[in-house]
Image: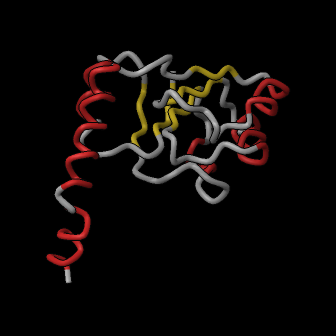
């Protein structure tokens, strides 16, 4: 299967490649999916999206016309995907069912510490 991965970040590429185990043909792109970049998925069977990608009706129609059958979301949320349009077009959509509650708790504590220690303001001052 040909899979185009939009919004691929350097830190996740080794994990995607390892999980793939050369089973599928991956096309890893740092570009976000939107109306200007949708043509990059030409002849792909599947498109992997992240929460920053746009999958509105117009984009989904162009994906379907280019041969895409599946959308694999690398996020639990799916508010960036027009699910009604995807269903009408016959596109199958899969997302991450949930994240680790420990990771979310750790991130929350990290954000609280950043607020308490005024790290965002300090970071801005260092940049200035």
Residue lying at 19% horizontally and 61% vertically, measured from the top left: 119
Position of residue 112 measured from the top left corner of the image (x, y, whole percent): 26, 45
Residue lying at 62% horizontally and 50% vertically, measured from the top left: 39
Q: Residue furthest front?
A: 116
Residue lying at 50% horizontally and 17% vertically, measured from the top left: 97
Q: Residue 18 or 119: which is nearer the viewer? A: 119
- Asked where in the image residue 62 lies, by quadrant, the reply is top right
Against 126, is 93 above or below? above
Q: Residue furthest bottom?
A: 128
- Asked where in the image residue 20 lies, by quadrant, the reply is top left
Q: Residue 1 or 77: which is nearer the viewer? A: 77
Relative placement, left or right, of 125 versus 53 is left
Position of residue 126 measured from the top left corner of the image (x, y, whole percent): 14, 76
Q: Which residue lies furthest to the right in this view?
A: 88
Residue lying at 51% horizontally and 33% vertically, measured from the top left: 48
Q: In which quarter of the image is the C terminus?
A: bottom left
Position of residue 13 measured from the top left corner of the image (x, y, whole percent): 28, 36
């Amino acid at each position: 299967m040909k899979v185009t991965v939009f919004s691929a970040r350097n830190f996740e590429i080794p994990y995607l490649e390892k999980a793939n185990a050369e089973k599928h043909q991956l096309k890893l792109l740092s570009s976000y999916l939107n109306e200007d970049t949708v043509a990059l998925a030409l002849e792909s069977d599947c498109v992997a999206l992240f929460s920053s990608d746009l999958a509105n009706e117009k984009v989904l129609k162009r994906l379907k016309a280019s041969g895409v059958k599946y959308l694999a979301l690398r996020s639990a949320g799916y508010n960036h995907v027009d699910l009604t349009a995807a269903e009408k077009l016959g596109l199958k959509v899969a997302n991450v069912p949930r994240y680790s509650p420990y990771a979310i708790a750790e991130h929350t504590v990290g954000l609280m510490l950043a607020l308490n220690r005024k790290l965002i303001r300090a970071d801005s001052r260092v940049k200035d």
